[in-house]
Image (cartoon, rainbow, N blue to C red):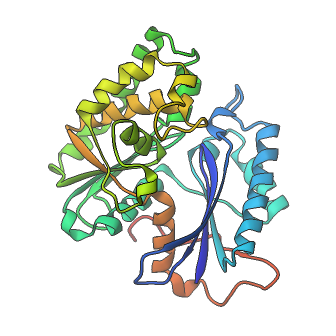
Amino acid sequence: MRLGVLDVGSNTVHLLVVDAHPGARPLPAHSHKAELRLAELLDGDGAIGQEGVDRLVAVIGDALRAAEDKGAEAVLPFATSAVREAANVDEVLARVAAETGVALRVLTGDEESRLTFLAARRWYGWSAGKLLVLDIGGGSLEIAYGLDEEPSVAASLPLGAGRLTAGWLPGDPPDPADVRALRRHVRAEIARIVGDFSRHGTPDHVVATSKTFKQLARIAGAARSAEGIYSPRGLTREALAEWVPRLASMPVARRVELPGVSAARAPQLLAGALVAEAAMDLFGVTELEICPWALREGVILRRLDHLPSIGGHADVAAVAVVAEFGDAAPA
Protein backbone atom coordinates (compact mmCIF):
# COMPACT_ATOMS: atom_id res chain seq x y z
CA MET A 1 0.00 0.00 0.00
CA ARG A 2 1.00 3.62 -0.38
CA LEU A 3 1.10 5.36 2.99
CA GLY A 4 1.81 8.96 3.99
CA VAL A 5 3.09 10.36 7.26
CA LEU A 6 2.51 14.03 8.01
CA ASP A 7 5.05 15.40 10.50
CA VAL A 8 4.22 18.80 11.98
CA GLY A 9 7.59 19.49 13.52
CA SER A 10 9.19 22.46 15.20
CA ASN A 11 11.03 23.44 12.00
CA THR A 12 9.06 21.96 9.12
CA VAL A 13 5.81 20.38 8.10
CA HIS A 14 6.93 17.33 6.17
CA LEU A 15 4.83 14.81 4.26
CA LEU A 16 6.63 11.58 3.43
CA VAL A 17 4.84 9.15 1.13
CA VAL A 18 6.12 5.56 1.04
CA ASP A 19 5.23 2.25 -0.53
CA ALA A 20 5.06 -0.18 2.35
CA HIS A 21 3.76 -3.48 3.63
CA PRO A 22 4.55 -5.58 6.72
CA GLY A 23 7.87 -7.39 6.57
CA ALA A 24 9.46 -5.03 4.05
CA ARG A 25 11.30 -1.75 4.38
CA PRO A 26 9.29 1.35 3.43
CA LEU A 27 10.34 2.71 0.03
CA PRO A 28 10.15 6.51 -0.27
CA ALA A 29 7.91 7.63 -3.14
CA HIS A 30 7.47 11.36 -2.53
CA SER A 31 8.54 14.09 -0.11
CA HIS A 32 6.72 17.39 0.37
CA LYS A 33 7.88 19.91 2.96
CA ALA A 34 7.48 23.50 4.02
CA GLU A 35 9.63 25.46 6.47
CA LEU A 36 7.49 27.00 9.24
CA ARG A 37 9.85 27.10 12.25
CA LEU A 38 6.94 26.98 14.68
CA ALA A 39 9.36 26.85 17.61
CA GLU A 40 10.36 30.41 16.72
CA LEU A 41 6.80 31.71 16.25
CA LEU A 42 5.67 31.49 19.86
CA ASP A 43 4.58 34.79 21.36
CA GLY A 44 5.46 36.11 24.81
CA ASP A 45 2.81 33.88 26.39
CA GLY A 46 4.11 30.76 24.66
CA ALA A 47 1.23 30.57 22.17
CA ILE A 48 1.41 30.10 18.40
CA GLY A 49 0.23 33.40 16.93
CA GLN A 50 -2.60 33.88 14.46
CA GLU A 51 -0.22 34.17 11.51
CA GLY A 52 1.52 30.95 12.50
CA VAL A 53 -1.77 29.05 12.76
CA ASP A 54 -2.92 30.46 9.40
CA ARG A 55 0.28 29.23 7.78
CA LEU A 56 0.04 25.86 9.51
CA VAL A 57 -3.51 25.29 8.24
CA ALA A 58 -2.51 26.27 4.70
CA VAL A 59 0.57 24.02 4.68
CA ILE A 60 -1.35 21.02 6.01
CA GLY A 61 -3.96 21.54 3.27
CA ASP A 62 -1.19 21.58 0.66
CA ALA A 63 0.31 18.40 2.11
CA LEU A 64 -3.02 16.56 1.99
CA ARG A 65 -3.48 17.51 -1.65
CA ALA A 66 0.04 16.26 -2.39
CA ALA A 67 -0.74 12.96 -0.63
CA GLU A 68 -3.89 12.55 -2.69
CA ASP A 69 -2.05 13.40 -5.91
CA LYS A 70 0.53 10.71 -5.15
CA GLY A 71 -2.10 8.06 -4.44
CA ALA A 72 -1.65 7.67 -0.69
CA GLU A 73 -4.33 5.41 0.79
CA ALA A 74 -3.91 6.80 4.29
CA VAL A 75 -2.08 9.65 6.01
CA LEU A 76 -0.77 9.43 9.57
CA PRO A 77 -0.65 12.98 11.01
CA PHE A 78 1.31 13.89 14.12
CA ALA A 79 2.82 16.92 15.83
CA THR A 80 5.85 17.27 18.08
CA SER A 81 7.21 19.71 20.65
CA ALA A 82 6.31 23.10 19.10
CA VAL A 83 2.59 22.24 19.04
CA ARG A 84 2.75 20.08 22.16
CA GLU A 85 4.13 22.89 24.30
CA ALA A 86 2.18 25.79 22.81
CA ALA A 87 0.01 27.56 25.36
CA ASN A 88 -2.90 27.45 22.90
CA VAL A 89 -2.43 23.84 21.78
CA ASP A 90 -6.14 22.98 22.07
CA GLU A 91 -7.12 25.99 19.98
CA VAL A 92 -4.53 25.13 17.33
CA LEU A 93 -5.65 21.49 17.11
CA ALA A 94 -9.32 22.48 16.92
CA ARG A 95 -8.74 24.91 14.09
CA VAL A 96 -6.59 22.45 12.13
CA ALA A 97 -9.31 19.81 12.51
CA ALA A 98 -12.11 22.20 11.53
CA GLU A 99 -10.41 23.58 8.43
CA THR A 100 -8.50 20.55 7.13
CA GLY A 101 -10.20 17.52 8.67
CA VAL A 102 -6.90 16.45 10.20
CA ALA A 103 -6.92 15.36 13.84
CA LEU A 104 -3.27 15.80 14.69
CA ARG A 105 -1.94 13.28 17.18
CA VAL A 106 0.36 15.19 19.53
CA LEU A 107 3.25 12.94 20.48
CA THR A 108 4.75 13.12 23.93
CA GLY A 109 8.51 13.52 24.22
CA ASP A 110 8.71 9.91 25.40
CA GLU A 111 6.84 8.73 22.30
CA GLU A 112 9.19 10.73 20.06
CA SER A 113 12.20 9.07 21.67
CA ARG A 114 10.72 5.58 21.44
CA LEU A 115 9.55 5.85 17.85
CA THR A 116 12.90 7.26 16.74
CA PHE A 117 14.64 4.43 18.58
CA LEU A 118 12.42 1.90 16.77
CA ALA A 119 13.47 3.35 13.41
CA ALA A 120 17.15 3.15 14.31
CA ARG A 121 16.80 -0.40 15.60
CA ARG A 122 15.09 -1.57 12.42
CA TRP A 123 17.73 0.15 10.29
CA TYR A 124 20.75 -1.35 12.09
CA GLY A 125 19.20 -4.64 13.19
CA TRP A 126 19.88 -6.84 16.18
CA SER A 127 23.60 -7.17 15.40
CA ALA A 128 24.10 -3.55 16.49
CA GLY A 129 23.62 -4.66 20.11
CA LYS A 130 22.83 -2.01 22.69
CA LEU A 131 21.95 1.23 20.90
CA LEU A 132 22.21 4.80 22.14
CA VAL A 133 20.16 7.08 19.87
CA LEU A 134 20.38 10.89 19.84
CA ASP A 135 18.03 13.19 17.95
CA ILE A 136 18.11 17.02 17.92
CA GLY A 137 14.92 18.59 16.63
CA GLY A 138 13.81 22.19 16.43
CA GLY A 139 12.15 22.10 19.83
CA SER A 140 13.64 19.20 21.76
CA LEU A 141 16.46 16.71 22.19
CA GLU A 142 15.49 13.04 22.33
CA ILE A 143 17.73 10.33 23.78
CA ALA A 144 16.99 6.60 23.98
CA TYR A 145 18.98 3.49 24.90
CA GLY A 146 18.31 -0.22 24.80
CA LEU A 147 18.87 -3.69 23.43
CA ASP A 148 15.39 -4.42 22.06
CA GLU A 149 12.96 -2.56 19.81
CA GLU A 150 11.61 -0.73 22.83
CA PRO A 151 14.33 1.25 24.62
CA SER A 152 15.15 0.51 28.24
CA VAL A 153 15.24 4.24 28.97
CA ALA A 154 14.14 7.28 26.97
CA ALA A 155 14.17 11.02 27.61
CA SER A 156 13.12 14.26 25.95
CA LEU A 157 14.64 17.60 26.91
CA PRO A 158 13.65 21.14 25.77
CA LEU A 159 16.97 21.57 23.95
CA GLY A 160 15.91 21.87 20.32
CA ALA A 161 18.11 23.95 18.01
CA GLY A 162 15.32 26.35 17.01
CA ARG A 163 14.09 26.89 20.56
CA LEU A 164 17.59 27.58 21.90
CA THR A 165 18.51 29.90 19.04
CA ALA A 166 15.41 32.02 19.56
CA GLY A 167 15.79 32.15 23.33
CA TRP A 168 19.56 32.38 23.84
CA LEU A 169 21.40 33.57 20.71
CA PRO A 170 19.93 36.85 19.41
CA GLY A 171 23.13 38.20 17.83
CA ASP A 172 24.58 37.55 14.38
CA PRO A 173 27.22 36.45 15.08
CA PRO A 174 26.18 35.76 18.67
CA ASP A 175 27.79 37.47 21.63
CA PRO A 176 30.46 35.16 23.15
CA ALA A 177 28.86 35.63 26.57
CA ASP A 178 25.54 34.34 25.20
CA VAL A 179 27.28 31.32 23.69
CA ARG A 180 28.95 30.51 27.03
CA ALA A 181 25.66 30.91 28.89
CA LEU A 182 23.89 28.58 26.47
CA ARG A 183 26.72 26.05 26.72
CA ARG A 184 26.37 25.99 30.51
CA HIS A 185 22.59 25.65 30.30
CA VAL A 186 22.70 22.78 27.80
CA ARG A 187 25.28 20.82 29.75
CA ALA A 188 23.44 21.26 33.03
CA GLU A 189 20.19 20.00 31.48
CA ILE A 190 21.79 16.93 29.90
CA ALA A 191 23.87 16.12 32.98
CA ARG A 192 20.67 15.71 35.03
CA ILE A 193 19.68 12.58 33.07
CA VAL A 194 23.03 10.96 32.26
CA GLY A 195 22.84 8.76 35.34
CA ASP A 196 19.48 7.32 34.22
CA PHE A 197 21.26 5.96 31.14
CA SER A 198 24.70 5.07 32.47
CA ARG A 199 23.32 2.57 34.97
CA HIS A 200 22.23 0.43 31.99
CA GLY A 201 25.80 -0.04 30.78
CA THR A 202 27.90 1.05 27.82
CA PRO A 203 26.22 1.08 24.39
CA ASP A 204 27.62 -1.09 21.61
CA HIS A 205 26.63 1.39 18.93
CA VAL A 206 25.85 5.12 19.06
CA VAL A 207 23.75 6.68 16.33
CA ALA A 208 22.22 10.07 15.67
CA THR A 209 19.29 11.18 13.55
CA SER A 210 17.91 14.57 12.51
CA LYS A 211 18.88 17.28 10.06
CA THR A 212 21.10 18.97 12.65
CA PHE A 213 23.36 15.94 13.08
CA LYS A 214 23.41 15.33 9.32
CA GLN A 215 24.55 18.89 8.63
CA LEU A 216 27.18 18.79 11.36
CA ALA A 217 28.51 15.52 9.94
CA ARG A 218 28.55 17.01 6.44
CA ILE A 219 30.56 20.10 7.37
CA ALA A 220 32.97 17.79 9.22
CA GLY A 221 33.60 15.86 6.01
CA ALA A 222 30.86 13.20 5.75
CA ALA A 223 29.51 12.06 2.39
CA ARG A 224 27.06 14.26 0.49
CA SER A 225 23.38 13.34 0.42
CA ALA A 226 23.74 12.74 -3.32
CA GLU A 227 25.86 9.69 -2.54
CA GLY A 228 22.79 7.90 -1.19
CA ILE A 229 21.43 6.72 2.13
CA TYR A 230 23.65 3.64 2.21
CA SER A 231 26.86 5.68 2.22
CA PRO A 232 28.28 5.53 5.78
CA ARG A 233 28.29 8.87 7.57
CA GLY A 234 29.75 9.63 10.96
CA LEU A 235 30.72 12.43 13.31
CA THR A 236 33.54 12.48 15.84
CA ARG A 237 33.58 14.51 19.03
CA GLU A 238 37.03 15.79 18.09
CA ALA A 239 35.81 17.21 14.78
CA LEU A 240 32.75 18.72 16.43
CA ALA A 241 34.88 20.39 19.10
CA GLU A 242 36.88 22.07 16.34
CA TRP A 243 33.76 23.32 14.56
CA VAL A 244 31.88 24.78 17.54
CA PRO A 245 34.13 27.85 17.99
CA ARG A 246 34.25 28.35 14.24
CA LEU A 247 30.46 28.35 13.99
CA ALA A 248 30.25 30.71 16.98
CA SER A 249 32.36 33.28 15.15
CA MET A 250 30.44 33.07 11.86
CA PRO A 251 27.48 35.20 10.84
CA VAL A 252 24.55 33.28 9.37
CA ALA A 253 25.48 34.37 5.84
CA ARG A 254 28.82 32.58 6.21
CA ARG A 255 27.28 29.41 7.62
CA VAL A 256 25.04 29.12 4.56
CA GLU A 257 28.19 28.74 2.45
CA LEU A 258 29.22 25.60 4.34
CA PRO A 259 28.64 22.26 2.58
CA GLY A 260 25.18 20.79 3.18
CA VAL A 261 23.89 23.74 5.26
CA SER A 262 20.56 25.20 4.13
CA ALA A 263 19.58 28.85 4.52
CA ALA A 264 16.63 27.82 6.72
CA ARG A 265 18.78 25.78 9.12
CA ALA A 266 21.90 27.94 9.18
CA PRO A 267 20.72 30.21 12.05
CA GLN A 268 20.17 27.15 14.27
CA LEU A 269 23.39 25.33 13.49
CA LEU A 270 25.46 26.71 16.37
CA ALA A 271 22.84 25.87 19.01
CA GLY A 272 22.53 22.40 17.51
CA ALA A 273 26.30 21.97 17.60
CA LEU A 274 26.45 22.97 21.26
CA VAL A 275 23.78 20.37 22.09
CA ALA A 276 25.49 17.68 20.01
CA GLU A 277 28.89 18.35 21.57
CA ALA A 278 27.46 18.36 25.09
CA ALA A 279 25.57 15.09 24.54
CA MET A 280 28.60 13.33 23.06
CA ASP A 281 30.87 14.61 25.82
CA LEU A 282 28.58 13.86 28.78
CA PHE A 283 27.65 10.40 27.47
CA GLY A 284 31.30 9.60 26.73
CA VAL A 285 30.77 9.24 22.97
CA THR A 286 33.88 9.72 20.83
CA GLU A 287 32.20 8.85 17.52
CA LEU A 288 28.69 8.23 16.27
CA GLU A 289 27.03 7.13 13.05
CA ILE A 290 24.29 9.03 11.23
CA CYS A 291 21.12 6.97 10.83
CA PRO A 292 19.06 7.68 7.69
CA TRP A 293 15.80 6.76 9.44
CA ALA A 294 14.22 8.79 12.23
CA LEU A 295 10.84 9.68 13.72
CA ARG A 296 8.78 9.62 10.50
CA GLU A 297 10.04 6.16 9.65
CA GLY A 298 9.34 5.06 13.22
CA VAL A 299 5.72 6.18 12.87
CA ILE A 300 5.39 4.29 9.59
CA LEU A 301 6.98 1.14 10.99
CA ARG A 302 4.74 1.21 14.05
CA ARG A 303 1.68 1.59 11.84
CA LEU A 304 2.80 -1.30 9.65
CA ASP A 305 3.01 -3.42 12.79
CA HIS A 306 -0.71 -2.64 13.26
CA LEU A 307 -1.63 -2.70 9.57
CA PRO A 308 -4.73 -4.96 9.88
CA SER A 309 -6.43 -2.19 11.87
CA ILE A 310 -6.27 0.22 8.92
CA GLY A 311 -8.95 -1.73 7.06
CA GLY A 312 -10.14 -1.19 3.50
CA HIS A 313 -8.96 1.45 1.06
CA ALA A 314 -9.12 5.19 0.90
CA ASP A 315 -12.23 6.82 -0.47
CA VAL A 316 -11.73 7.66 -4.13
CA ALA A 317 -12.53 11.31 -3.46
CA ALA A 318 -10.18 11.89 -0.53
CA VAL A 319 -7.21 10.48 1.34
CA ALA A 320 -8.10 8.73 4.60
CA VAL A 321 -6.56 10.45 7.60
CA VAL A 322 -5.73 7.92 10.31
CA ALA A 323 -5.63 9.42 13.78
CA GLU A 324 -4.04 6.43 15.53
CA PHE A 325 -1.03 4.45 14.37
CA GLY A 326 -0.34 2.10 17.26
CA ASP A 327 1.08 2.63 20.70
CA ALA A 328 4.63 3.91 20.86
CA ALA A 329 5.23 2.62 24.35
CA PRO A 330 5.23 -1.01 25.37
CA ALA A 331 1.88 -2.45 26.37
Residue 124 position, x and y percent, is 29, 65
Residue 179 left/right relative to 238 = right
Q: In the displayed image of the protein, which residue is found farthest to the bottom?
A: 312
| Residue 262 at least partly seen | yes
Q: What residue lies at 60% left-to-right and 75% top-to-bottom? A: 3
Quarter of the image with the N terminus is bottom right
Q: What residue lies at 62% left-to-right and 56% top-to-bottom? A: 14
Quarter of the image with the C terminus is bottom left
| Residue 326 at least partly seen | no
Residue 261 left/right relative to 319 = left
Residue 167 position, x and y percent, is 57, 23
Residue 284 position, x and y percent, is 19, 37
Picture quadrant of residue 236: top left
- Position of 163 relative to 91 (above/below): above
- Position of 63 relative to 256 (above/below): below
Residue 271 position, x and y percent, is 46, 28
- Position of 138 relative to 17 (above/below): above
